[in-house]
Amino acid sequence: MSSLSVEFAGVTFKNPLVLASGTCGFGREYAEIFDIKRLGGLASKGLTLNARAGNEGLRIWETNSGIMNSVGLENPGVRAFIERDLDWVNGLGVVNIVNLGGHSIEDYIEGVRLLNSVKLDILELNISCPNVKAGGMNFGVKTELAREVVRKIRATCKHKLSVKLSPNAEDIVALARACEEEGADGISLVNTFLAMAIDLEGRKPVFGNTYAGLSGPAIKPIALRMVHQVAHSVKIPVMGMGGVVSWRDAIEFIMAGASIVQIGTGNFIKPDISLDIIDGIEAYLDAEGIGSVSEIRGIV
Amino acid sequence: MSKILSNHRMNEDFYLMRAEHQNDARPGQFYMLRAWGREPVLSRPISVFDADGDTVSFLYKVVGRGSAIFASLSADDEITLQGPLGNGFPNVTGKVAMVGGGVGIAPFYLAGKRLKASGVQVSIYLGFSGEPVLVSEYERAAGELVVKVGGFITDSVEPSDYDSIFACGPEVMMRSLYKKCKERGAADNLFVSMENRMACGVGACLVCSCKTADGNKKVCKDGPVFKGEAVFGL
Ligand SMILES: Cc1cc2nc3c(=O)[nH]c(=O)nc-3n(C[C@H](O)[C@H](O)[C@H](O)COP(=O)(O)OP(=O)(O)OC[C@H]3O[C@@H](n4cnc5c(N)ncnc54)[C@H](O)[C@@H]3O)c2cc1C
Ligand SMILES: Cc1cc2nc3c(=O)[nH]c(=O)nc-3n(C[C@H](O)[C@H](O)[C@H](O)COP(=O)(O)O)c2cc1C
C-alpha cells in the first residue's frame, strides 16, 4: 500500500485532502453526512475578528462549470469560533487549519493574537479582502500591501502560517515570494477569481457588489498554472486548489507542485467527493507502484 | 442513487416525479436532486410533494437546465436524492390555511394530507397562472379547496378565519399575504417557505442566508420555513 501521508511545514497530514475554507463551515454539517475523520485536514470558514453578517441579496450564481459566490465572509467572529467550535475540530484527528480574514491590519493582528492562545495546526491567512483603510484596495492584489500584512502578522503569529493568495494578484509569483521572504511557512492558492454576471431583463449586475468570486472546474486550468508557477518559485510548501473534483485533478495539482490539495466547490457536487478522491489517489499510486504521494510532487 | 418509478408531464410546465427512496420526510422539507455528473455544478432543491416510507414525489416546473434534465428522465432512470433536508412546516392544530402560488403549491399536498389526518381543519388555496393540475388530489388532502387561475390567490384568503397560515410561492405573494395578515393582527400565525438559491443544501456554505429578526438564518438548514414576521416584519 502506498503512503498518502504528507508533511507540510512540519505538520503531518494523513493524506493530502483538505476541505477548502468557506465550503464546509467548521465541519459539523458534513460530519453528519460522511466520515470526515478520514480527511487530511479541514480549513475553517473564513473568520474575522468580529462577527460579520455578510453580503445582502443574492450570494450564488451558477455558471458553466462553475459558481460565483458573494457571501461576504459571514462568520461568527474569532471569539465565538474559539468558544463553540475549536475543541470540536481539534477532536476530529484531522489537521485543523483556521482561516482568518480581515479588513484592516489591526483587525488581522487582533484576530491572530486571540488565536495565538489556543491550539490549532495551521493559520491560513486569507488576504483576498478589501482593506477598508486603503480605499478598499484588496490586500491580495498588490505585492507590497501583501508584504506588509504578512510581515506584521508574522511578527505576532505563533502558529504555522500559510498565506492564501488571490488569483487576482497583479503578479502572483512576486507576491508569493514576498510572503516567503516575510516568513510565511506555506502558501495556499488560489482563492476565487473576480467575475461577473449580468441580468439581461433587469439590465444590471446579478450581484449587489457587481463582481463576485468564481470557483469550480471552470477555473482549474488557470489555478493549476498558478500553482505550478508558485510552487516552482518558492521553497515553502504549497496547498493547491481551484476546481478539483476528481482524483485526476488532484494528481495534476500534486504533479504541478502542491503538497496538499483543497476541495471547495467539489463538495457541492457530492458532499463526500473528497473521500472518493482519497481512494482514487491511493488506487492510482498502488497501480503505478509509487510508494509515496510525495514522490510525484512537482515532477512536472 | 434512487430509481425513478414515474415522471409525467402534468400541464404546460409542471411535472410530477416519483422515486424509490426510504424516507421519513415531513411536509415542507426538500431534497437536493441531481441526475447528472459534474455539470451543472449544483444540485437542485425541490420540495417534497408526497412521501410514504418507501417513495418520495416531487412536483416541479421546468425553468432552466437542471429542471429540463429532470423532465427528460423516464421510469427506471436513476437520480441522486440528498435529503430530506430542512425543517418543514410546524405541526399545528385548529384551522389552517395553506396558500400556494405557482409551483409553490408543491408542499401542501403532503402537508394537507398529514394535518387533515390528525384532525386539523385544512383549507388549501392554489394559485395557477396556467391550467390547474392535481385538483382532485388536493381536494382529497383538504377539507376545503380554493383554486384560482390568474389574479392574486392571496385575495381569496381571509387570515382571521384561521389559527395558522402556511404560504409558499413567489416572494411578492408571500409578502402581500404577510401584509394582509398584519392588517388583521394575524401576522404571528403566518409561516412562509423561502426559496433562496442554494449550494451545499446542508448549512455549510452560507450562500442561502436569509435576513430575519433573529439574525441571519440558513434557509437550507434553519428553514426553509420561517415565521412570516421574522422574514417580512423587518
Ligand atoms: C427549499 C426549496 C424548495 C423548492 N421546491 C420546489 C418545488 O417543489 N418545485 C419546483 O419546481 N421548484 C422548487 N424550488 C425551486 C427550484 O429549486 C428551482 O426552480 C430550480 O433549482 C431551477 O433549476 P434549473 O436548473 O431548472 O434553473 P436554472 O435557472 O438553470 O438554475 C440555475 C441555478 O439557480 C438556482 N435556481 C434557479 N431558480 C431558483 C429558484 N426559484 N429557487 C432556488 N434556486 C433557484 C438553481 O438551483 C441553480 O443553482 C424550490 C427551491 C427551494 C430553495
Ligand atoms: C461559497 C464559498 C465560500 C468561500 N469562503 C471562503 C472564505 O471564507 N475564505 C477563503 O479563504 N476562501 C473562501 N472561499 C474560496 C475557497 O476556499 C477556494 O479557494 C475557491 O473556491 C477555489 O477552490 P474550488 O474551485 O475548489 O472551490 C469560498 C468559496 C466558496 C465557493
Image: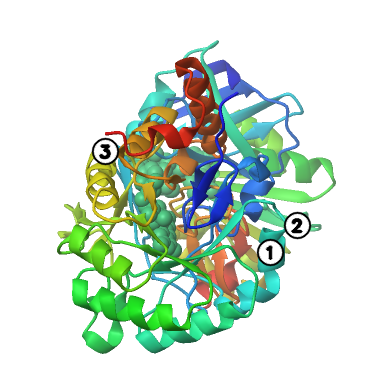
The residue under label 2 is B95
Disc 2/disc 3 C-alpha distance (Å): 47 Å
Of badges 1 and 2, the one in the foreground is 2
SS for dot 2: strand
| Picture coordinates of residue A69, whole percent (x, y) | 35, 57
**Residue ID at (64%, 40%):** A38
* Marks 2 & 3, CB-CB < 8 Å contact: no
The residue under label 3 is A64
| Picture coordinates of residue A141, whole percent (x, y) | 21, 69
| Picture coordinates of residue A89, whole percent (x, y) | 66, 59
Quarter of the image that includes the C terminus of chain A:
top left
- Say which chain tag 3 marks: A
Q: Nearer the viewer, residue A30 or A11?
A: A11
Q: Nearer the viewer, residue A177 or B202?
A: A177
The residue under label 1 is B161
* Marks 1 & 2, CB-CB < 8 Å contact: yes
Q: Nearer the viewer, residue A61 or A248?
A: A248
Q: Which image quadrant shows ligand 1? A: top left
Whether residue A274 is visible to the viewer of this picture, yes or no, is: yes
Quadrant of res A199: bottom left
Q: Is residue A21 above or below residue A262?
A: below
- Say which chain tag 2 marks: B
Disc 3/disc 1 C-alpha distance (Å): 48 Å
Colour mode of the rendering: rainbow
**Dot 2 amino acid type:** Lys
- For label 2, being within 8 Å of ligand 1 is answered no
Disc 1/disc 2 C-alpha distance (Å): 8 Å
Is the same chain shared between marks 1 and 2? yes
